[in-house]
Image (tube, rainbow, N blue to C red):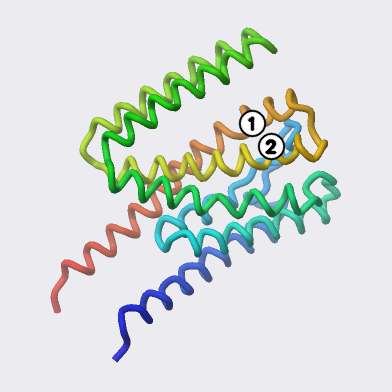
Amino acid sequence: MESSGTRSVVRKIVVAGVLGAIIALLGYLGPAGPGFIPVPTPAQHATTLHVPVIIGAILEGPIVGLVLGLMFGIFSWIQAGMLGVVMFQDPLVAILPRLFIGVTAWAAYAAFKRTGKNAALALAGCLVVICGVFVYWVIGVNMLLGGVIGVALLGLIAGFVYLALKENTELQALILAAAVGTLTNTILVLTMLVVRGYLPPEAALIAGVTNGIPEVIVACIIVVAVVGAWKGVETSRAGSTV
């Protein structure tokens, strides 16, 4: 008789294999597909390959997320060689930051599920402080840009507080995990680009705003839809009788 531990390992392998195949397909299609989308920013491409990483981490834990993040990084590195994007041919830029996407997404999801509203409100307070410092820095570079970003961030924080005060903690946890995983990718990659001397801080800031916000929105929509549907199917199976 198959033990629950064996079934869990098999499930992790299957989920990692399916999501890894999606990453491979998106990465293989390159600029012809939705994996690496050319954009007129210093980063040159927006990506959707972090989304399967986040989904895998939420469903099966940080190890699966780590493996999928590694696959994402490898395909980013391969595509950079094919397209001649020098800064992403550096594995410290293309691969290393992607290892943390699934880990942070899983940690955010698990922590929120355990602590609920209090964690959400505490996080919202931290976001207010962090975003305030960020906007103050941007205003020093460009006042109009700083004002626009400030209004957008306040709207996002207000929306998150609203969700935190509602009862559906699963929805909030999924949104939080998607946002944290996406921002991990954006922030760490841009930080490495600055540290390694490929971009000045001002260019990294522009890329972070223009790439990061749309990527967060897309990730939240897809993660909520896919994981919500998956968990709904699991619940139906668990509640059915034969």
Q: Which mark is residue 190?
A: 2
The residue positioned 79% from the left and 28% from the top of the image is 200
Of badges 2 and 1, the one in the foreground is 2
Which residue is nearer to you in this view: 177 or 108? 108
Q: Which residue, given by chain and number where applicable, does mark 1 sit on? A: 208
Q: Which mark is residue 105?
A: none
Image quarter of the C terminus: bottom left
Q: Quadrant of residue 44?
A: top right
Image height check: is 103 above or below 238?
A: above
Q: Are marks 2 and 1 in contact (CB under 8 Å)?
A: yes
Amino acid at pointer 2? Leu
10 Å crowding of disc 1: few (<14), some (14-19), many (20+): many
Q: Position of residue 209 (x, y in %)?
A: 61, 27
Q: Position of residue 149 (x, y in %)?
A: 55, 18
What SS does tag 2 mark? helix
What SS does tag 1 mark? helix
